[in-house]
Amino acid sequence: IKKIAVLTSGGDSPGMNAAIRAVARTGIYHGMEVWGVMRGYSGMIDDDIFKMDSRTVANIIQRGGTILKTARSKEFFEPEGRKKAYANLKKRGIDSLVIIGGDGSFKGAQKFSNEFDIPCIGLPGTIDKDIAGSDFTIGFDTAVNTAVEAIDKIRDTADAHDRLFIVEVMGRDAGYIALHSGIATGAENILIPETKTDIEELVANLTEKERRKKLVNLVVVAEGDEFGGANEIARIIKERLPQADTRVCILGHIQRGGSPTCLDRLIASRMGYHAVECLMTGKTNVMVGVVNNKMHYTPLDKAVKAKQKISEDWFKIVKILAS
Ligand code: F6P
């Protein structure tokens, strides 16, 4: 391995810059050339590739977003697109690839490395924490802390008006942001895609709290819950519980931005460092993850979106602590 290209793909997540920095600096430390690809696979196809040096990644560890920008490329999923991408790597002598992104990006990498002789390493970069093979994904901790900070603020105004707030957090297929931020902010109910919600029980629970004049009522909903997010839940609740003064707040993309937390910087740095180590030791076509605080390697085709089974304990905790 002499020349590594690194790219970010799919939705951005805080900590991607720290991972790019780690890949670049570790590669350069070992005497390799490191190349940056702009806008994910699109930049590989459009030949938007540049040589990085140690200074290219200076002063970025604390920055959200990604200096390499990101995109979701449809063309790369066509054989023609991958052929063009390969030609652009080959003409520079690039012999390996590090992809920071989600499971969709890994699928592309798996296809690419099967067709061409380019070993690929994936690093899980998504705020959703929905990829098998890692306890953490780069960006999750920052996103969840952003959500907690925002929900704390909502709690202040909810308290001032004795209101019921339905707060929607991100998570199309995974409820981790909702579960973690909901418990950390003392939410009454948390609705996530992984489990069915008994709407009658939810209404009964809120009615009982309304009767007891419980001052703050917060319901945290993942955008991908079975009802389709906060607006629909609010509509149902308003119909069934018209006496409650109900408001909706959708946190949206603020969860994707901001300076990464210490944990995200740390896992991004560890993962980036180990990505290069993997390439050097021939452990290729794997996603680098962290399981039980140890590095863990999952074949790229197994590093898929995993609808995890959420332990009943989590919901017991919510129920008991918010009573
Ligand atoms: O996968 C990360 C994520 O932020 C999801 O939580 C969300 O559903 C989606 O991306 C939003 O994507 P976009 O930025 O393309 O609207």
Image (cartoon, rainbow, N blue to C red):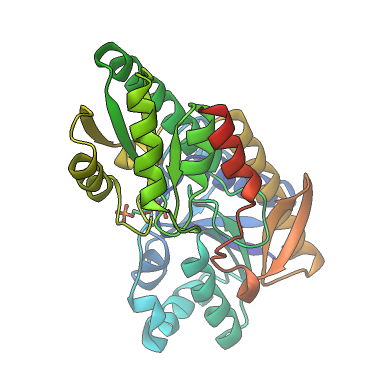
| Relative side of 141 to 42, left or right | right
The answer to whether residue 19 of the structure is visible from this angle is yes
Identify the residue shown where x is 38% and y is 64%: 43
Quarter of the image holding residue 122?
bottom right
Quarter of the image holding residue 275?
bottom right
Please tell me whether residue 190 is drawn above or below residue 124 in the rendered image: above
| Relative side of 254 to 89, left or right | left
Please tell me whether residue 111 is drawn above or below residue 257 in the rendered image: below
Please tell me whether residue 37 is drawn above or below residue 303 in the rendered image: above
The answer to whether residue 260 of the structure is visible from this angle is no
Count numbered badges in the picture. 0
| Relative side of 150 to 98, left or right | left
| Relative side of 50 to 167, left or right | right
Please state which of residues 2 and 71 is positioned toward the viewer in this rendering. Answer: 71
Residue 285 coordinates in the image, percent (x, y)? 67, 72
Quadrant in the picture for the N terminus: bottom right
Please tell me whether residue 176 is drawn above or below residue 5 in the rendered image: above
Residue 224 coordinates in the image, percent (x, y)? 37, 56
Residue 247 coordinates in the image, percent (x, y)? 22, 31
Quarter of the image holding residue 64?
top left
Identify the residue shown where x is 58% and y is 32%: 320
Identify the residue shown where x is 49% and y is 51%: 126
Q: Residue furthest top?
A: 160
Please state which of residues 98 and 257 is positioned toward the viewer in this rendering. Answer: 257
Identify the residue shown where x is 50% and y is 57%: 195
Residue 38 coordinates in the image, percent (x, y)? 39, 57
